Structures are given as C-alpha cells and as structure tokens.
Amino acid sequence: MKTDTPRVIRLSEYAPYPFTVESLDLAFDLDPKATRVESTLKLSRTGDSGAALELDGEDLRLVSVAIDGEALAEDRYEATDSGLRIAKVPDAFTLTITTEIAPEDNTKLEGLYLSNGMYCTQCEAEGFRRITYFPDRPDVMTTYRVTIRADKGVNPVLLSNGNRVDAGDLDGGRHYVTWEDPFKKPSYLFALVAGDLARVQDSFRTRSGRDVELNIWVEHGNESRCPFAMESLKKAMKWDEDVYGLEYDLNLFNIVAVSHFNMGAMENKSLNVFNAKAVLADPETATDADYAYIEAVVAHEYFHNWTGNRITCRDWFQLSLKEGLTVFRDQQFSSDMRSAPVERIDQVRSLRARQFPEDAGPLAHPVRPDSYIEINNFYTATVYMKGAEVIRMMHRLLGEDGFRKGMDLYIARHDGTATTCDNFAKAMEDASGRDLSQFKRWYSQAGTPQVEAEGRFEDGVYALTIRQHTDPTPGQDTKHPQHIPFEVGLISRDGAALPLRLEGEPADGEAPLTRVLDVTEAEQTFRFTGLEAEPVPSLNRGFTAPVRLTAPWSDADRALLMRYDPDSFAKWEAGQQYATQLLLNAVNERAAGRNVAPDATRFVDALGTTLSDETLDPAYRAQMMALPTEDYLAEQMPVMDVDGVHAAREALKRDIAVTHADLFTKLRDQHRAAAGPFAPTAEGAGHRALANGALAYLTTDPANAHLAAEQYDAADNMTDRMAALRVLVELDVPERDRCLTDFHDRYQHNELALDKWFSVQAVAARPDTLARVKDLMSHEKFTMRNPNRVRALVGAFAMGNPTVFHAKDGSGYAFLADRVLELNSLNPQIGARLLQPLGRWKRMDEDRRKLMTAELDRILAAPDLARDIYEIASKSRQA
Ligand code: B3K
Ligand code: ZN
C-alpha cells in the first residue's frame, strides 16, 4: 500500500484564497515532447498580510520564476511535486512563470495531451495545475489572454476561449493565434485545442439579434457526421432563451470532437471539448440512443454557460450546484424535444441503476459531499442525478413560475461569481417565500429514503399513512426525516380517477384528481373524504421524489393501475413493480429448491392489454415491454442471487413470448413498417424500439434466430442492426459468428461503431464470454489508452454482464482487478471508475465476498497506488 495515506479535503476547512488574480496571460509553444508555457499573473493581496503565495502544480518542469520582471533565486521559492510556494511576496505584483510539459506522455488525459495528434486540454477538476503553476481552485476567477504558437503545417487550427484577437506567421514555419476571453473564469474552464481540423460552420441569431458563429471541429473525414449535433446546439440555444430567458454571451461558440476523452464532454467557456461519441452521428453507425445522447450532451454543455460558467462553484463540494442544476435543465430540454413520459421513465431507470446502488453502498455520499480524497471520484450519479432530482423537487414545490423567479434571482445575485448550494436554495426561498430549511437536508444527508405507504378505508374516508426512514450510510449514523413532495391519486375499482378531498376542505368545492402531498415527518396520515368504496392509491406519481417505495398493493391493484392509472409514469411503474415481485418470488422459490415459478398469468395478460393499446405511444409501450433489469432485481435482494435472477427473468421472458407470440409478430411487422426509411426522430425511434422489443421476445425461441439475422442484413440503420446483433450474440446459431464477422469487417475503420462490436460481445451471458473478452484484449484495435475502448470492453463486461462477471470461480473479479492495476499508472481516473463493481461484495454470498475482497486487497497492496484508486478501493473494502 501507498506509504503516506493521501490527504482528506474537507468542506469545513474551506478558506478563501488570500490573493486576487487580476489577469492571466498565457503563451504556449507547442511541442509534443517539450511544450513551453509562459504564464504571467497580475496578483494583489486580499487576505492575510503575512500569507505566502501558494500555487498548485503537478508533473511540471519549472524553468523560471520572476516577480515584477526579476528572476527569483532558487532560495526564494520552494517547488514540490504538488506546487510552488513563495514565502515573501509584495501586496501587488506581476508573477511570470515558465514551465515545460510533455503532452505526448500524458496518458491521464488531464491537462494538455495529444489525441490522434491533436492537442487538447481537460482541466476540470484539477487539470490546469498540470499545465502551469496556478491557484487551481474554482473560486479564483480571472480574465485570460492566450497566445498559441505552433507549426503551421501540422497545427493549422489553434483555438482557445473567447475571441480571436490576433494571428500571424512566425519564423521556421510556425504561426500564432491570440485569444481573449472577456469573461472571468476559473482555471477549470480554460481550454486549448490545436491540430489539423476540419470545420463545420453554422450560425445562430440570438433573440436580441446578435449573430453567433457556431463551429464544430472534427478530424478530417468526419464533417458529414456533424449536422445532428449542430441542430441540437441551435435548439438548445433557442430553448434556453425561451424557457429561462438566457441568451448566449459571445459571438463565437466552438465544439471540438476528440477521440481520447475521459468522459462525455466539457463545458469550457466558448470552446466545448467533446468525446467524439457525444458529437458524431450518421444513420449507418449511430443508434437512436446515440442520437438522443448527443442531443442531451450538446444541450447540457451549452446550458453550463449560465449554470456553471457565468455562475460557478465556490469549491468542489458545491459541484452539484452546477451539475445537478444543469442535468435538470437538460432533462427538461429532452422532455420538450421528445416524449416527456418516456424521458421521465428513462431518467428513473438510470437513477435506479446507478444512483440508488451508490446510495446503498460503501461509496454513499450526500449531494454536497463533506470530504474527498480525489475530486474526480465525486463526479458521481449522486452529485449529477440525485442532484437533478433535488432541483426537480424544488421545481415541484415552487411551481413553474416560482422556480423561474428563483432562477432569475439566483442569476441576478450571483452572476460573475463562484457560489454555493446554500445560496442557490436561498434565492429560491427569497423569490417564492417558501421555507426550504428542512428541504435542504437533501443536500447534506446521504442515502435513499424508504417510504412505506399504508391505506385504511372506513366510513367514506381513505386514510393514507406515509412512513419514511433512511438507513445509516458511511459516516452518517443518524438520519432525519426529509421534506418529500409526494404526488398521489386515487383510482376506483372500475378504473375511474377519483377527486382528492382532504379532510377539512369544503365538500362542495372542486377537488383535484391528483395532488402533491408535503411529507415532512417520520409518520404522517392524510385523510381523503367523500369516497364510496375503498380506492386503489396511485403513489409517487411522476416519481416526484427519489425514494424507494413499498405499498401493500395486491396483484389485482397492480393490474388495475397498469390498465387505468392516468399518470403515465405510475402506470409504467405498476408494471415494473408487478414484474419485480413475481421475479423475486420466483428466485426465492428456486433457491428453496422448488422449481415452480409463481403463476404470472395475470401479469402477462395485463401486459398484453397495455401493449395492444394503440392509443399509447409506441415509445411508451416499448418501455412497458422491457422487464426490470437483472441488476435492478438483484439490488432488491438482501443477498444478491445473480444466477437465480438471470434464470427467473429469462423464464418470464419466454412465458410472455409464448403467450403473446402473435401480438409480438404483429407489433414487429406493424412498427417496422411504420418506422419507414431511417430518420433520427423521436417518433421513428419509438417505432424501432417497439419493433425491436418484440424481436427480443420472439428470439427467446432460437428457432426464430433467422428473424434477427434477416433484420441484421436488411437494416438501413444502426439501431436495427445492433438490436439484431444483440439477440444473436446470446444464441448458439451459425448466424451469430457470421454477423459478428460481418460487423467487424464493415466497421473496423469506424472507431465508434467498433466500440459497439467490442461491447456486444462483452455483455453476452455465455460461459465463454470472459475467454472471448480476453482474446479481444489482443485484438489489434484494442488499447488501454483509449477510455472509450476500455469502457466498451472492460466496462461493459464488469457493469453489463452480471452472471459472467460474478462467475463463481472469481475469474471475472480477477480480470477486472488486473485491468484496474494496469490503469493505475496509465489513467487512474478511468481505473477508479472501473473498479466500483467490486465494492458490492457485502451484498454477495460468502464465497463471492471472499473472492471480491481478495481482489480489493490485491489492489490496495500495489505499490504507488494513485489517489483515485486508493480512495475507491479503500472505501469499498471497509466492512
Ligand atoms: N463538467 C464536466 C465533467 C468534468 C469531469 C472531471 N472529472 C462535464 C459535465 O458535467 O458537463
Ligand atoms: Zn455538467
């Protein structure tokens, strides 16, 4: 293990930086092995008169330091491997620092690095310190002037933030461009890109009539794959004006697509850098899901211009201030562009798949964490997705208008500054007059509340009792009740929506058919009056609160809700919970040695009724059709039985497929036809999703494999081709190998499509999958240096293939630990992400626990463990 345990950073220790940086001038001389960076800071003291000047810096070669033009002797400063300290400095001065870095050797992809010969930067959260010495913290904001010098032939395009103010040729075939960003920003929003790039150009006229030049920069040959991202950008710009009154503030907006990138994209001021996967799309190689992802990410990064850039975070504990809010905004945008109910279902699916397990595991932390070792480990589902749910709840509590007033006030108060989650909530309170003091617990308390509902009917009154409770999480033993906005409805036995009249309300007034209850206590009872018979409650409609809910619904109640609930989320949820209960019963029966699955007839019939209902949107029916995932099901068990879950789920799929064989054939034919020639619209995507869902059921009978093979061959788009391949890889039929080989040969020169080829093999629930994954590691196109490829193969295996990853002999665990150790020196940020499935050991059976903890111990024993990996492995290992 690392001898010196890494330092823990705490929110309680926050102190303002004792200097202001008035301006920053950067000059880069680009070279793959030795890039020179000259940095000139104008500083003035704002804090303690004795304070030393401390700058962050990592992996830098210091060439020189000067104050007011005078070079400092070596005894005037101290350079360590984490920074530069100058004990004595004047109150106002100019500091000039020259450093040298080697972009070519930068495999961490933080700071300045090379991706396929293109220079690019990633500075959030703490990458700027890998470029030069600087107070690399978000509350130090300044204006940047950046000059880039490089070989003109190799790097004709030189980009940075803001406006291009100067350019010219230099000796030796070099040239330069100077950029000036008039807006103050923290260092994490700095960006530089240089290379031989193709430009796709467009423009947008803002509502006040300014023309903004829009560019997407890509590697040559990718120009034709940009129009969708460009359209998404223009839609996002317009949407933010219409919905929030927020206009873009410069005359230029650039997006650059790079192939080596640690995450999805980055919102650097006016120079967004994107993972190629989040920009490039054409029908031949992008699925409907890819298109939707691009639309959402382009919007997300654009929306950061106001929520993140103009107003940024005071410190990294406030990360959700910009991320939760911006995710909420991109979710609203996607709902407006597509089907709102379907979007909400997707959001809840991913919240349950990623955030709920995080909240219930060893890495649980509040939306605003109070400590970290490596901030990169806190770009989590909790900060992003639960953070967005917190904003959504405020939106619900304040209403559309109240929320908008709160946003306006937030922006008016804090524009141009670095602020906190508390200040955001304060603006919401002040604008609406609502007291959010209890509500703010959502920021500080980790763990998913468990909500239990109970109903009693007597004398025309339905008493709904709601109890809430949150289990302890690491470091938080005592939990307090949350303020939960909980939307409910009541349905009669014959399917009618009933008016909700609370006791004490006038009996003659109009009563609403749905209402949001303010649940604030550990136990609370709401009494609804004027009812003739016992109703069926519809609870947490629209998923108004991110909680786990249990309610004493009978099978008949669930079937009734599936059929009649007018809230489309609750209707879907009734089906999911019904299936979950049936499947978990089946797993338990099997574990007890009884091999008769519980009778699913009523569920299967109710599902058939919904799927046949042509008044329902096809995309929505596709959501109804998809059973809860294996991971979700296993997550509901005290001790996960991954094999039992797989077997039970496959059996129910077959049962449904046999009962509704004709319906599936009909749905498939009908919606393949309705989809027509490919266009990446939400409507077309809905038809394809329903047709492909039907295909997946039909091919539970291997005799139908030919349907998939025919679809594979005939497809005019990647959604249909991948859907076919996805079912074929599970089967032992000759078409499997034929189609896999064909896919490889067709797309071997297209990196994004090739990633799909790696993934689809890694997720196959087959005994030979791990062997295949290991073979693929030696494929000539496999490399541990490209995060997309690592995620496509290793990530897909560890996170998308529960039965094989959890193989009883521990081979899946050992394979993963080996990859994590390989990434320890190469790219620890990616390594730390990958290792997370090992942290679920406490939920496994005894044998698997031993195997998993042994791998965690092996990782922890490795020499020179990176902070990223040390933090996740050590927290995961704790009993
Ligand atoms: N803000 C970036 C994420 C940076 C991650 C650093 N490890 C992308 C986004 O959320 O928009
Ligand atoms: Zn973001």
Image: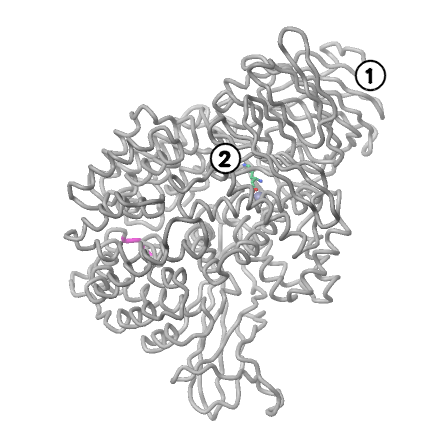
Q: Position of residue 568 (x, y in %)?
A: 45, 68
Q: Does the magenta run of residues contain 588?
A: no
Could one spot residue 394 in this view of the protein?
A: yes
Specify the label residue 68 is tagged with: 1
Front-most of residues 445 and 733: 733
- Up-down relation of residue 483 to residue 60 (above or below): below
Q: Is residue 200 left or right of residue 420?
A: left
Left/right of residue 734 with respect to residue 742 in the rendered view: left
Residue range highlighted in magenta: 637-641
Foreground mark, 1 or 2, reads 2
The residue that label 2 is drawn on is 275
- Helix, strand or loop at label 1? It is loop
Residue 386: image x %, image y %? Answer: 53, 54
Q: In which of the image's four quarters is ligand 2 placed?
A: top right
Rendered residue at 38%/62% (across/down): 618
Query: Please, is residue 339 above or below residue 833 in the view?
Result: below
* Above or below 222: residue 72: above
